[in-house]
Image (spheres, rainbow, N blue to C red):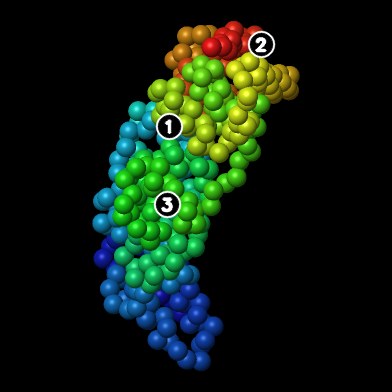
Amino acid sequence: MNFQFVGSGRPVSEFAQAAYAEAIQAELANAMGGSENVFAAFPQMRGGGGDESWSEEKGAPPIAKRCLSELPMVRISEEDLVQDGNDFCCVCLDPQRVGDVALKLPCGHLYHRECAVDWLQKHCTCPNCRYELESDEPAFERGRSKRMRERRPRYRRRDLERRSARDLRALLRDHGLSLAGLCEKRELIDALVASGSVQIIPEPVLELACDANALATLWTTKQLKELMLHAGVDSSRCVEKDELVKAILASARVAPAPTHADDDQRSAASAAALAKIRLEDLRRRADLMMDYEPPTKKKLSRADIDAMSVASLKAELAKRGLEHELRGCPDKDHMRRVLARCVNGSSPATDSEQLHSD
């Protein structure tokens, strides 16, 4: 049987070609009858008539036009690049940098607008995590609502804390949760976690030798940030010292000791806790630097390092086995200092700042 597709002169999509071939194969396999099968495919391939109802075999349908038009365009921040998969657009694989404009999906992943639109007009899912967005297919929507409620995406708590209140509200709505009475960002996170709609990834807890009062009274701002970096607690939104302490205690990643009886005991315990943290970091960095063999003898200059973007700094640190330096949303200056110490062959400097007592 020799078939020739006669259309409007426009290119035939791969989907149409595949459907056409399958129809012919089915007709040949059932030569005793049922010839209407092959001709029933023609209206669908020509863009009209037939039964175009969605089925799971077809995969995710295109995104709803209304949903696509509501997706926000954002200017990429350093915080955005910390999220897994945002260092580059996973559609075209080109790197993304601070200051670039990108389209942001409700799951938090970022893409070049043209890449995201091209993808979403074919599949209403995030290319990175398969988060499902709204479509115009009623059958798919019935299943999507159920899947989104049962999916229980996995997050680190600090990942939720990095997201904007707008993103958190969208996440709550996607899981069918009420926003009534929820104003603060922490209330949105607590409601999401309490609902069981998301799974919080357990993280190791750092047990401190000192108590919570010592953190507030004896530790300096710089030392608190050092502790947060070690424990993987985000400090980017904290300005005042009391905000740092609150973030540490609320993170559930640091467990202070019971309250000490006197100031001398508290001071000694604080010094011991800080010394232990620094010793662990020094050992870990030393082990990594002993295992690392520079791929080139050329050393980066300070000017080279200062000119690097956040993505480039992260890539250079990863090449040198220093991924642990990226925990807790480190700032750009910290990454520059670590990279400078590494490429220049100097040992990690210890902080000369000492704990002060009352």
Q: Quadrant of the C terminus?
A: top right
> Which residue in the structure is indicated by mark 2?
347
| Residue at 54% across, 83% down | 29
Q: Secondary structure at mark 1?
A: helix
Q: Which mark is residue 191?
A: 3
Circles 3 and 2, Cβ within 8 Å, touching? The answer is no
> Which residue in the structure is indicated by mark 1?
79
Amino acid type, residue under disc 1 in the picture: Glu
From the viewer's side, name the closer residue of 25 and 145: 145
Q: Position of residue 174 (x, y in %)?
A: 38, 57
| Residue at 46% across, 70% down | 56
Amino acid type, residue under disc 2 in the picture: Ser
Q: Position of residue 316 (x, y in %)?
A: 56, 23
Q: Secondary structure at mark 2?
A: loop
Relative to 316, is 48 on the left or the right?
A: left
Q: Which quadrant holds residue 61?
A: bottom left
